Amino acid sequence: MVQPYATEEEISAVIDQYGKLVRRICFLYLKNPQDVEDVFQEVFIKVFLTNQTFQNEQHRKAWLCRVTYNKCKDFKRSFWNRRVQTYEEVEIPYESQEERNILEDVMALPAKYKWVIYLHFYEGYTIPEIGDITRQNTSTVYSQLRRAKEKLRKEMGG
């Protein structure tokens, strides 16, 4: 069993290890750097305050993905978010121009497709694992992934 975080060093290590993952998931949904940072902080506060034990690191990572997803959904539903609109240009975190183009196409997808594409291609989860994380039937995840890939093919020109 993997134990919860206790020391400052463990907290720093988990932010270093999973910070990029959490930010990318947040960018997929929120598209605003300030909102991403707010949710990022909320996610890690929840991580550090939880006394949940994990079976292994893969279980911890899946739990963290789920917490991030839920925090993003909560933020989108919040009173503040429904009443405030921003018109800032968003800089998507990317490592190359090709990755930027792909991320822009992925971000143009509906939310249910973005989530499946991200978990499968960026994080390497299998379809059954994605079903567990998103609490959806495996066949639903297969359908969403297939539809998302079709939409991406159209956007990217075949």
Image: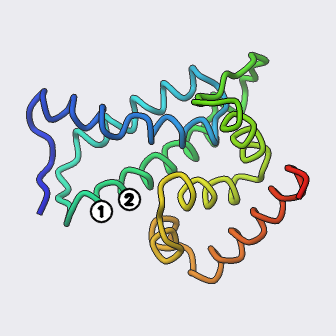
> Do the residues bearing badges 1 and 2 touch, measured as CB atoms within 8 Å?
yes
Q: Crowding near pointer 1: few (<14 within 10 Å), some, many (20+)?
A: some
Tell me the residue at 50%/68% (across/down): 130
Classify the position of the C terminus by image quarter.
Answer: bottom right
Residue 6 locus on image (x, y percent): 9, 38
User: In the displayed structure, would residue 132 be above or below residue 47?
Assistant: below
- Which residue is identified by label 1? 59
Amino acid bearing label 2: Ala
Residue 142 locus on image (x, y percent): 65, 77
Residue 105 locus on image (x, y percent): 78, 44
- Which residue is identified by label 2? 62
Circle 2 — which element? helix
Q: Quadrant of residue 19?
A: top left
User: In the displayed structure, would residue 78 be above or below residue 56?
Assistant: above
Tell me the residue at 57%/57% (across/down): 121
Circle 1 — which element? helix
Classify the position of the N terminus by image quarter.
Answer: bottom left
Tell me the residue at 53%/38% (across/down): 24
